[in-house]
Amino acid sequence: MDKIKAAQKLMQEREKEHFLLLSLSNSFARCLDYDEFLNVVNQELKDHLLFDFLAIGTTDQHEKQYQLFFHSDQKIAKSSEGLCYDVNDCFFYEALRSADPVRIDLGLPNPKKNAIPPFITNTSVFGMRELVILPLEYHKHNPSVLFLFFRKPQTLDRNAIRLLKGLTLPLALAVSNILVMRKLENKHENVSLSDILKFNPAKSQKEENNTKIIGNSVAIKKVKTLIHQVAPSDSGVLILGESGTGKEVVASEIHTNSSRSEKPMIKVNCAAIPVHLIESELFGHEKGSFTGAVEKRIGKFELANNGTLFLDEIGDLPLEMQTKLLRVLQEREFDRIGGKKAKKVNVRIIAATNKDLQLEMQEGRFRKDLFYRLNIFPVTIPPLRDRKEDIPDLCLHFLNKYSISTKKKNKTLSAHALKEIIHHSWPGNIRELEHCIERSILLADGTVINDVSFLLDNEKILASNIHSEFRIKSLKEMEKEYILKVIKLCNGRISGPNGAAVKLEIPSTTLISKMQKLGIKKQHFLE
């Protein structure tokens, strides 16, 4: 029993670490200027790593010198402006060579004392005893090192070090985003978007020619890797993601790169077909098989034979049709309505949904056996707010697309407009961004788009909940919904002065524990 309790306790601790890392990562992802970054460091990160000072050094493009990009103490930051340091000063270079945090006792004599930067040597005045250095995730032409100063040595325990290592990528992306926005602000108001893309350090210079998936963020690269791994096989794929994230584009990429690419990919939107017509739509019918069947109809399964069938919004398929679909997937044959014999079929199934199928199964609205049959190879598409470094590429793509279709050529975004776009939360994801760019092109008088046309809240079509039937909900379900609403109002922040825990007047650890019990995950409160 003791071993079981210990294992449970360890699992609970790891879950808390996971939610904490998620919360901090979300906070850093939203940082687009120095002040926002400073607030997250001093008001959120400091509570968990217990450092006295935090600094970040970034190199120039030649990687021979570095400057202090950030220091948590504003007086030290001010006094360090414009100063450059040699990357071989035995601290910066030492960090780049190590994958793990390096501890340095500041009380010991250093033979290279004259080469030590003042922002390190001067910390003795403040009683700093230990320095921990760690490289952030590497960006070419922009390697960065994190410096943590402590008055009390050995402050970082194993859990804190694990958290620190998990934050190296979110910190690096925040640094890149802020550097990009600084360059935007230093440029002329009418700088072209193509010029902006040239100096984005988080972007590779060329987009892959053989893909329609735009972007080079870490999140979207993972999706591209999964597509590359699954496309050559005939395995079923379940694509998960919010509305507007590009699930159909991912499905098309899988089909295009498969051995079935010469055969058709047939698309079915399960949510758009009336319930009484779904069976006929999928399996077809014989002439005279029911009232109104004036001619034979070939169903989508038959049309997709030897190719791919894309079942979009699979979570909206009625239970009766889920049973019939499961039979086709298991036996690879189907019956037309009114048909006399079963037809063999060879199709690859790619399904997609924006619903939480785990919750749908718990509520009895989705069959577990069908879920496990579909969920052979899941691909989760990140929302746009989790891949904001891809926004300049996406904007350029939509500008080119709609400048042609609207016959308003040579349109570009100003630096101010791009900054507005990056700051937006994008609840409608890429689809919302696409429509926003199209509207902005139509409304712009000159060649430069200075003002972005976002839809106002009262103009958005609220498709869900408006006319839904009343349904009795459990207290657990109501609690989950309420906590989710509060977290969304706090832009995904759990801890800190602007976090959901403060609004709910409970400790952040209690909130995290409640979230675990209620099954609240990242994709829920970032919808």
Image: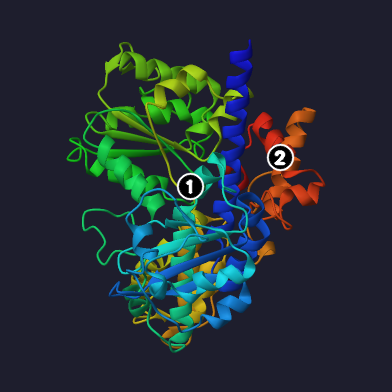
203 or 339, which is in the foreground?
A: 203
Q: Residue 169 appears at what percent x and percent y?
A: 44, 54
Identify the residue shown where x is 55% and y is 73%: 122
Task: Indicate the secondary structure of the residue bearing disc 2.
Answer: helix
Q: Amino acid at mark 1?
A: Gly
Quadrant assignment, res 136: bottom left
Q: Residue 468 appears at what percent x and percent y?
A: 71, 39
Q: Amino acid at mark 2?
A: Thr
50 or 434, which is in the foreground?
A: 50
Kindly check if marks 2 and 1 are in contact, taking CB atoms under 8 A apart as contact: no
Q: Earlier in the sequence, mark 2 or mark 1?
A: 1
Q: Residue 173 appears at what percent x and percent y?
A: 45, 61
343 or 213, which is in the foreground?
A: 213
Above or below 470: residue 447: below
Above or below 233: residue 432: below
Q: Which quadrant is home to the N terminus?
A: top right
CA–CA distance in space, label 2 to label 1: 19 Å
Residue 166 - label: 1
Judging from the image, the colouring scheme is rainbow
Q: Residue 457 appears at what percent x and percent y?
A: 67, 62
Q: Which residue is mark 2?
A: 509
Above or below 128: residue 189: below
- Residue 232 visible in this rendered orientation of the protein: yes
Residue 110 relative to residue 229: left or right: right
Task: Indicate the secondary structure of the residue bearing disc 1.
Answer: helix
Tell me if mark 1 has few (under 14), some (14-19) or many (20+) residues whose alpha carbon lies within 10 angstroms of its own.
some
Identify the residue shown where x is 45% and y is 63%: 109
Badge count: 2
Identify the residue shown where x is 23% and y is 30%: 233
Residue 283 - label: none
248 or 157, which is in the foreground?
A: 157
Tell me if mark 2 has few (under 14), some (14-19) or many (20+) residues whose alpha carbon lies within 10 angstroms of its own.
some
